[in-house]
Image: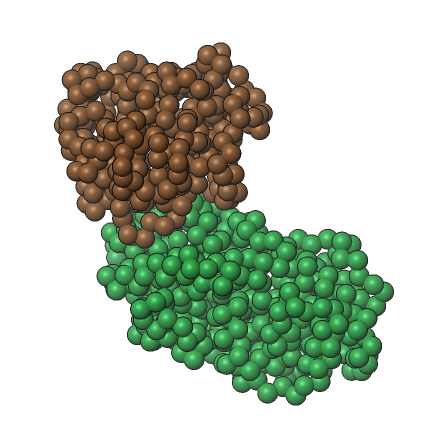
Amino acid sequence: MTTMTWTRALRRRRRALYISSPIGLGHAMRDAAIADELRALRPDLEIDWLAQHPVTAVLETRGERIHPLSAELASESAHFAAESSAHDLNAFQAIRRMDEILLANFMVFHDAVADGEYDLVIGDEAWDIDHYLHENPELKRTAFAWMTDFVGWLPMPEGGDHESFLTADYNAEMIEHVERFPRLRDRAIFVGNPDDIVPDDFGPGMPSIRDWTERHFAFSGYITGFDPGPLVEARDDLRRELGYRPDERVVIVTVGGSGVGESLLKRVIDAYPEAVRRINGLRMIAVAGPRIDPASLGAPAGVEVRAFVPDLYRHLVACDLAVVQGGLTTTMELAAAGRPFLYFPLANHFEQRRHVRHRLDRYGAGRFMEFDEASPEVIGAAMAEEIDRPIASRPVERDGAARAAAMIAELV
Amino acid sequence: MATARAPERAPSEARPAATPAAREQARARYSDTTGFIERDGVHVFYEVYGAGEPTILLLPTWSIIHSRFWKLQIPDLARRYRVITFDGRGNGRSDRPTAPEAYAESEFAADALAVMGATTTDRAVLVGLSMGAQRGLLLASDHPERVAGAVFIGPSLALQQTIPGRERVNDFSERLDTDEGWAKYNEHYWRRDYRSFLEFFFSQCFSEAHSTKPTEDAVGWGLETDPETLIRTHVAAGIGDRDATLARIARVRCPVLVIHGRDDRIAPFAHGEELARASGGRLITIEGGGHIPNARDPVKVNLAIRDFVESIQR
C-alpha cells in the first residue's frame, strides 16, 4: 500500500524555513534574535533552520529545530578559511570562487521546500537562494524575506580595472534580477539605516547604491544579537562577576572564530611592552579562538592567552578597550556597548574595508587601523590614546530585531 | 586491466609550460575513490562520488577542458546516485599522448568502457556535453547493454548545419592573413597565442550575459593542456559524416534526453533537434541559452537530469 496525506489549507500550521549565512558568526546571533521576536508575534509559527557550522553551534544551544537536510550542505566557512591567508581575504573573489558550493547548497534548499509545506523562507545573506531563485523564478514555493547588511560588490584597488569590471557586472546582474522579478523578494530588509549605505555607485554609469537600495529595501536599523542595555547599565557588577578589578585597565584582543587572525593576535601581543609602559594597570587578554593554538602565539609574561571565552560579548561590554578585526558583528557589538576599540580590516576585504568602515564612521565608533602599517609601537600608542578617550559614538538602536520581525511577520 | 594508483602520479609526458594551473577552488563534494585506467600506455584519471543507484557516467567533452566542467552537477547528482567522471585524455590528470590517433573518438569510448570496468559498473546513464555526444553515441549504439539512458547537452555532431561565420574552422591548418573571429580557430594561431584563442572560444560558448566566472574557469582548464595536444585532438578521427552519424542514432535503443541552447554558437541548435527526433528522445530547449547550459543554467539542467533518471527508474 502507498499512502499520502494532504492537509487542508486552514488546518496547516504556520511554518518558516530560516537560512542564516555561515560566513562569520554574526548572522546566527542576529537571526536567533529575530526568530524570538517573530515567535512573539506569531506564537504558532514553527521555524526550521537549514544551517551549517558555525550557525548550528549557536542554534543547538538554543534548542532550535535543524532541518535534517542541513547535513547535506557543503561548508561555506571552510571555503572562506581556505581562501584567506595571513591578514588577507579577497571576499568578493572568495564569493565568486564559491559558485560550486552555492549551487550545491541551493539544490539542497530546493529539496527542503519542494514538498510545499513551508509558508515562508527567510534568507539572511543566503546568496545561493536569492541568486538561483532569480535565475529560476518558477521554483519559488513560499513567501521570501531577504536580509542583508550591505548592498553592492565593490572593487579593491589591488584588483585593478578587471575587478572593477567584475563587481560592476555582478551588481548589474543583481539589479536586473530584482527589477525583472519584483515578485521574488516579498520583503527586502537592509540591516541598518540609509545613512549606513556607502556613497558609491554600483559601477561606472550605474545607479547610486544608496538611491537604489532606498527604493528596493526597507530598513530595520542595526540588529544586535543581544541587548547590551542591561549589561551596560550594570557594568560594574559585570566586571566584578568576570573578575576584573576596578583599577585594572582590561584590553581584550579577539579575532573571532576564524583561523585568519593569527597574524593580528601576534602583532598585538608584540605591542604589549609598549602598551604596558603607557597604560597603568594594563591587563591584556588575547582570545585565540577554536582554530589557533594558544601556545603558537608566544605570548610574554603578563599577557593572558585563552583558547575560548564563553559569552565573549559580556567581556567586550566589561572591557576598557578592545582590539579586533574589521567584521561588522564584533565592531558593532562594541559600538552598542559604548566601548573604545581599534579595528584592523583584512586586506582586500571589500565589506570590512568599505561597507563596515563607512558604518562605523557614521556611528563615530572605533579607530580604523591599517595592519600593514601598524608596528607594535604604533599599536601600543594607539591603545593608550583610545583607552582614555571619552566615548562620543552615537547610540546603536536596540529594537532592530523587533522591527525586522514585524516586517517579516506580515508574510506569515 | 585497470590499475588504481595514487592520484598524484605525474603524467608520462611533461606538463605544458604555458601557465601553471590556478589553485583549485574548494569543492562542494570530494570524490570517494579515484584511480587511473591504462590503455596502450595511456593513463586516464577517474573519480567516483556517492553510492546511489543508478550510476551516472559524466563523459568528457573536447579535451580543451577536463572533468571539472561537471562541477555544478557532481555534488547534486551524487546525493542521489553514484557519479563517475574522468578526465579526457589530453587534459586534467590524464596523459597527453603524442600520436593524433590516440585522440580518435573510438579511444574516448574505449576509455569510458575501461573506467566502467575499473569501477565495476555494468550499466550507467551517460551524460555528455558537446563532443561528448560522439562518445555517447558510440557507446549507446555499440554497447546497448551498458547504457541505461543517454543525456546529450549541446551535442556537437557531424550533421549538416553550421554556425554562420564558423567556416574558417575548415582552414584549420592554413596560414591565414587574419586573426579575427573564427580565424583564431587555427593551429598556427593556437601556437602563437593559445590563451587568446581560449578566451575567444569560450566567449562564444558562453553567449549569455554575466558569464565571467564560467568563462574564467574554462580558460583556466584550457591552460592545463597545451596547443600541440589540442591540435592532435582536432585532427583525430570523429564518428563519421552525416550518414554515419544518423546510422548510429538509428541504432540507439535507450531513452534519450537532449538539452540544447537556442543561442548555441558552437553546436547548432538544429543538431540537438535532429538528434532528439531521430532517436525518439525528448528535447529541452533553453531559449536564450548558449553552448554550456550545465555551467550557465545548472539548476535547470540538474533537475532535468534528475527527472530523466527517475523516468528510467520507474
Above/below status of A398 relative to A355:
below
- Res. B56 visible in picture: no
- Residue at 28 percent of width and 59 percent of height: A177
- Residue at 73 percent of width and 80 percent of height: A384
Chain identifier for the brown-coloured part of the image: B
Chain identifier for the green-coloured part of the image: A
**Dividing the picture into quarters, in which one does residue A203 lie?**
bottom left
Residue B96 appears at what percent x and percent y?
46, 23
- Residue at 26 percent of width and 18 percent of height: B239
Position of A402 with respect to A365 (left or right) is left
Report the colour scheme. by chain
**Dividing the picture into quarters, in which one does residue B59 lie?**
top left
Residue A125 appears at what percent x and percent y?
43, 61
Above/below status of B59 relative to B214:
above
Residue situated in front as seen by the camera: B160 or B44: B160
Residue A126 appears at what percent x and percent y?
42, 58
Q: Which quadrant, please, contains the C terminus of chain B?
A: top left
- Residue at 50 percent of width and 42 percent of height: B22
Residue A251 appears at what percent x and percent y?
73, 73
Of all residues shown, which one is farthest toward the right?
A: A301
